[in-house]
Amino acid sequence: MRLLHAVSSLCCFAALSLIAPGCGITILGKGTDADEQSGGGSGTAAGVGAGSGVGGGDPCLPGIPVTSQIPRLLDRQYDAVVRDLLGVTTLASAGDLPPSALLVPDFEGDMTDPAWNGYLAAAEHVAAEVMGGPNKPTFLACDPAAPTCLEETIITFGRKAFRRPLLEEEVQSLLRLTAVEPRGTPDEIAEAILFAFLASPSFLMRPELTQDREGDAIKLSSHEVAARLSFLLWDSIPDDILDAAADAGQLATKAQILAQAQRMIQDREKTAPVVAQFHRVYADIRTGSRWGAIEHDTTRFPDYSPDVVAPMMAEMDALFEDVAFEGGAFKDLFLSNVGYVNQDTAPLYGLDAADYGAELTRVELDPNERPGFLTRVGFLSSYSRYDATNPILRGAFVSTRLLGVNLAPVPGASETPRPPGEFSTEREVVDALTSSTNCAVCHDTYVNPPGFVLERYDAVGKVQTIDPLGGAIDGTADVTFGANNVKRITSPIELMNELAADPGARRHYAERWVAFATGRAPNGNDACDVDGLSASLSVDGYTLLDLLTDLTQTDSFRLRVVGD
């Protein structure tokens, strides 16, 4: 449409000029969710290091980290916003894919031409389908030919799209589209206005431009706090209640923020995807990781088939959601016996497939045999090989992802050939493989022991007492949990109880939540908040949702600092 081409130059870059002058802005990329990128924060970097030592991390340095003032929406946030704002979840004109399919994948850095063109393409498709379909009233509730309809639409829709009231200059800039020649029909003009909104930096980014001071920091406005709340807890825009609180200036204190956060997390439909997304980051469940990507020998493991992959991965999200929204605490990530199975995955848990259908069913498994997410088939089958278990990978996951041990990868280690000799268990193979002096330092202390405990589960996640090589499973090992803290572990339930109670594991979990919420790599300033949250996780009755609301109570949530 010719009118849309005019909008690209007339309106979108004009909108950028409205948010940029004289603000001392640091413009950064929207980041990447490949490892630790955030939901609701406004950080300067992505990626969480493993920490120093076991459960280590940066020491607390009081202060507020430097933050970006205008982070871009992540792709998943773009989809959620378009859904909540316009009712659009898929685009027929894009093969029934979500709108973010037209965007470049999340990335760190400045805006690029391909990224900008992706936003323009998405805006054009969304605007056309809204104006030509049943979702039109979500944008336009009046006759666009009526004298005041388009101006009223700009003001009311813009309030939701920009997460704040529009400036008069913005209203007038958008109204200029009514005079563009050749003049379109009223519906075409309305579509061009919607396109302009969707391609505006004030929609695609989350500017924080208030300059009011509080001590050495800048205090966010109520509208900016509302956006932080909604993107942290919902990955999307504020609802009407939060908007009303922002308009009334009622998000200025920690108590006011907490009241809204506690209300918002009760909306399970909106909050659960954020909880699941965090735990995917925590457990490294992402495209390109091992999760759900490992094939297995179906002749050796007849209960396994490619059909189990989708349900076993869906079980992970369901389990994390169940722990969070059923009043679970940190320890329940490792001790919950709740499972979600269907006809394909039931046999892997020793259940009768005939009792289940295609949909996931919530079940309670043996609490001693299946405590926590590390004993679910999604993890166990992903951290195995095609035809055997992999104690090294399972143990390294526990030490690095959960305990925060900083282990540098050894180049070429994965290509190390199987050692010669006759072996009766996979444990014997690994012992022989890692017995050299160079390997033993890390493997004997950190890597192999937790993996050996998890040898009680075979390559596809079934319980085993006899190794496929013929020997009896030995699941006893001396596991290192911290400096001078080595414990003899004889069963998976013992391992999970120790992980659930381990201060390093708690701190690492809290550190990852802070990184996820802020979009920042761990640092000394955020370490103070990490320490406080980690201490809270050890208190009886303190739930995962308590931690989520407490993230909104830090000084860095309502204040920001601009870098030099």
Image: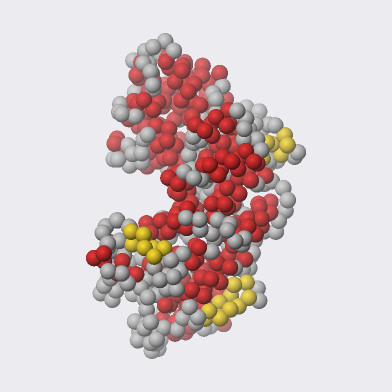
Q: Nearer the viewer, residue 351 or 477?
A: 351
Write the residue at 57% across / 32% down. Answer: 245
Q: Is residue 264 above or below residue 179?
A: below
Residue 176 placement (x, y as % from top left): 47, 15
Q: Is residue 86 above or below residue 39?
A: above
User: Residue 242 sits in which quadrant?
Assistant: top right
Write the residue at 56% across / 50% down. Answer: 548
Could you tell me if residue 349 is visible in this image? yes
Residue 192 placement (x, y as % from top left): 40, 22
Write the residue at 45% across / 30% down. Answer: 199
Residue 480 placement (x, y as % from top left): 58, 75
Residue 218 placement (x, y as % from top left): 69, 36
Q: Nearer the viewer, residue 470 or 456?
A: 456
Indicate left or right for 315 with 334 as reference.
left
Indicate left or right for 296 with 239 as reference.
left
Colour convention: secondary structure
Query: What quarter of the picture does the N terminus occupy?
Result: top left
Write the residue at 70% across / 32% down. Answer: 212
Q: Is residue 217 above or below residue 313?
A: above
Could you tell me if residue 42 is visible in this image? no
